Image (spheres, rainbow, N blue to C red):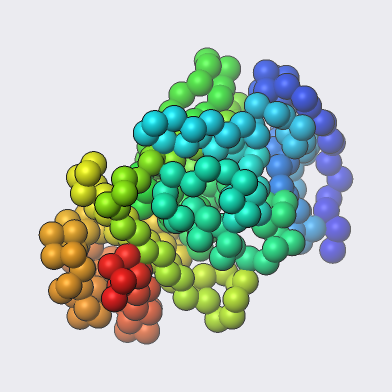
Amino acid sequence: MKAAKFDYTKTNDVAEALSVLTAEDGDSKVLAGSQSLGPMMNLRLARPDRLIDIRALDALKAVTQAPDHLFVGALVTHAAIEDGILPDVTRGMIQHVAAGIAYRAVRNRGTIGGSLVHADPAGDWPAALRALGAQIVIDGPAGTREAAIDTFQLGAFTVALEEDEIVRGVRVPALSGSARWGYHKICRKPGEFAESIGAYVCDPESGIARLVLAATEDAPLQLDTAAAAIAQNDGAKFDLDAARMALTETGETFDPFKLRMHAVALHRAVAQAYGA
């Protein structure tokens, strides 16, 4: 199939893009990498009245390093992160995550901001950046605001972004030299959508420990009690049974197959973090 008829606007300025978003009635969609929106339009699962092409917005390609974080512009591609073009303040985590996203052709065009806004439950960046405790920077008519990533994604394909707002980028907290991380996803074959994602980050210097499960039917699930216990024991007692128990204690319901698969993803993420 082919996309339904739509209007097209290309903009070189953030303010102009914001004004176009609210200038006319109808459904407007922002076009960046188009690795999700394009296929959805061709299948007519999405039928926007107009596309606003923001690929020329240099302000959304900025990368800035600060002592405690790295700001990554929304239009930075997965491939740029994979190739180490950006400073990696996460001791290799974001580079590892980027390298495992889909296929190289997708990574060449797909953007970190597009992934966050699309909010696919099986998406890598929503899971990884939640484990890192990232902040989303958003531009709108009233100026710039920030949102914690755990409040940004409200559910499957649903984010706390108004129709007249655009994601400028994401602030990724820097990890200390003593930090540990693990990221494991289960796919039927390389490049496919994940069936389960486990992400774990622990940084003793900042006192954070996060364990995240993704590729469920909703937003990533954060297991704070389990993460605190894992950090206290350096992952020694977090076996498959402990992972299953942690999932059970969330109150979520998983069929036996999914429960085991999610437990495996979490266990392997923690094992990777501690070199087990």
Question: Which x, y percent locates residue 148?
Answer: 38, 37
Q: Is residue 225 visible?
A: no
Q: Residue at position x 37%, y 48% from top?
A: 132
Residue reaching furthest bottom?
257
In the image shown, does 46 or 191 lie closer to the viewer?
A: 191
Residue 269, x across and y down, in percent? 35, 68
Q: Is residue 261 above or below residue 68?
A: below
Residue 225, position in %: x, y?
A: 17, 57
Q: Which part of the image, by quadrant, shows the C terminus?
A: bottom left
Q: Is residue 208 left or right of residue 58?
A: left
Q: Is residue 87 left or right of residue 217?
A: right
Task: Choose between 12 and 253: the one closer to the eye.
Answer: 12
Residue at the top extreme?
A: 142
Q: Nearer the viewer, residue 4 or 32?
A: 32
Residue at horizontal 24%, vertical 73%? 243
Question: Can you tell which quarter of the image residue 45 is in?
Answer: bottom right
Q: Residue at x 15, y 74 (%)?
A: 237
Quadrant in which the N terminus appears: bottom right
Q: Position of residue 138 (x, y in %)?
A: 52, 29
The tally of labels here is 0
Q: 23 above or below 121?
A: above
Residue beneath the point at 65% across and 40% down: 75
Q: Is residue 200 above or below residue 195?
A: above
Q: Is residue 175 visible?
A: yes
- Relative to 185, is 210 on the left or the right? left
